[in-house]
Amino acid sequence: MWIEWDETLSVGHEAMDREHRAMVTVIRRLFEENGKQPGSPAVQRLLDELLAETRAHFASEEALMREVGYTDTEEHRDEHAALLTELQVVLERARKSPESITIDTLSFITTWFTDHVRVADLALAQFIEDGGPVIRSRAFSEPSGASA
Ligand SMILES: [Fe+2]
Ligand SMILES: [Fe+2]
């Protein structure tokens, strides 16, 4: 399984897309390095990098959800937490038994990532684009040019 950035991964929100792109790049390098030597130190470093990047990305999405008053925050956060746990498990396995890191392991991460982006993240981006409750109420409660 190979991962390339393409438009089907775009959710139409600039910051989210930018961070997703960066994650795709790390995942692609993971496949490359693991192809050379399964679970090598380079693979372990990349998994570390992916974990840190994912954690930061999830934190920024969760801040965004609070900011816009997103209605499905809890469900979305649960998916984030589950994905982080999985990544940690893979990283630990890579450290203990590097040879157990196969294409299947990486494909699993890839599938989870792309599924999450195409469903949960897309829903969030669309909510923002449609102007969620906070954005809408702001528009109604702050009429421009209100006379004093
Ligand atoms: Fe997300
Ligand atoms: Fe995301």
Image: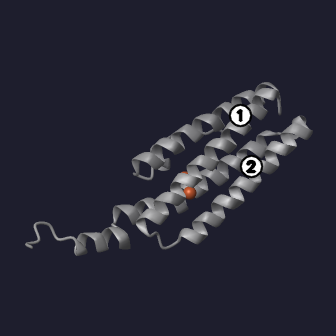
Which secondary structure lies at badge 1? helix
Residue 121 can be seen, yes or no? no
- Amino acid type shown at disc 2: Leu
Q: Quadrant of residue 27?
A: top right
The residue under the point 61% across, 39% down is: 3
Do the residues bearing badges 1 and 2 touch, measured as CB atoms within 8 Å? no
Q: Is residue 104 above or below residue 40?
A: below
The residue under the point 84% across, 44% down is: 92
**Left or right placement of residue 11 versus residue 41 in this view:** left
Residue 40 can be seen, yes or no? yes
Could you tell me residue 2's position as x and y percent?
64, 38
Disc 2 under 8 Å from ligand 2? The reply is: no
- For residue 65, which numbered disc appears in the image? none
Residue furthest top in the image: 36
How many angstroms separate mark 1 from mark 2 (CA)?
11 Å
Viewer-closest of 143 and 23: 143
Total numbered labels: 2
Image quadrant in which the C terminus is located:
bottom left
Residue furthest left in the image: 147
Could you tell me residue 54's position as x and y percent?
62, 47
Which secondary structure lies at badge 2? helix
The residue that mark 2 highlights is: 87
- Amino acid type shown at disc 1: Leu
Q: Residues within 10 Å of mark 2 (few under 14, many from 20)?
A: some
Q: Quadrant of residue 94?
A: top right
Could you tell me residue 126's position as x and y percent?
40, 62
Viewer-closest of 101 and 48: 48
Q: Residues within 10 Å of mark 1 (few under 14, many from 20)?
A: many
The residue under the point 50% across, 48% down is: 9
Q: Is residue 62 above or below residue 114?
A: below
The residue that mark 1 highlights is: 46
